[in-house]
Amino acid sequence: MPIAVLALVAVLVTGFLVPVRTSFSMSVASSGITPSEADRSFPHGAVVVFSWNTSDGGSVSFSVVDLVGHTLAHASGSSGNFTFTADGNPYGFRSFSLFYEVVNIHGEYTAPVLA
């Protein structure tokens, strides 16, 4: 009986200590002078890895900005990929193009243990 209890406790503790990997996807449509933005929050310390591409292969200016507007990553083109470590606050995925473009974003993040 004590061995079964210890095994159960070990399984429960291990479940809390294993980092959780979560997938996400979103889209940002842009056109005109003002950049379009979609916001998303990630857990503090989470390593976020994602790629982006335009729906029709057109070129856009694409950025990831933090809560205070600092640019964490930027690229111009039809696709790219970025990695950053989140601080628990919202991030803006910002797209700018002169013509109508939809930017598709697909990625995942791994939340740290006991964050």
Image (cartoon, rainbow, N blue to C red):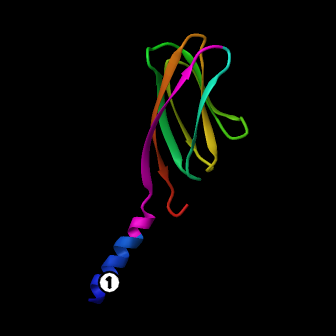
Measuring from the top left, give residue 41's x and y in whole percent: 58, 45
Q: Does the stretch in magenta take in 19?
A: yes
84, above or below 94, in the image: below
**Could you say where residue 61 lies in the image, as x and y percent from the top left?**
60, 20
Which quarter shows the N terminus?
bottom left
From the viewer's perspective, is residue 66 above or below residue 35? below
What secondary structure is found at the residue carrying circle 1?
helix
Residue at 61 percent of width and 29 percent of height: 37
| Magenta segment boundaries in residue numbering | 14-32
How many residues crowd mark 1 within 10 Å: few (<14), some (14–19), many (20+)? Answer: few
What residue appears at the point 50 percent right and 61 percent down from the top-left corner?
113
Q: Quadrant of residue 115?
A: bottom right
Frontmost residue, 81 versus 58: 58
What residue is drawn where x is 50% and y is 26%? 80
Disc 1 residue type (three-letter): Val
Q: In the shown orientation, is residue 13 left or right of residue 7?
A: right
18 sits to left or right of 95: left
Which residue is more in the foreground, 96 or 18?
96
- Residue drawn at x 71%, y 35% is 70
State the image coordinates of residue 74 (x, y, percent, origin top left).
Answer: 61, 27
Q: Which residue does the numbered mark 1 point to in the structure image?
A: 5
Question: Relative to 24, is 69 on the left or the right?
Answer: right
59 relative to 16, above or below: above
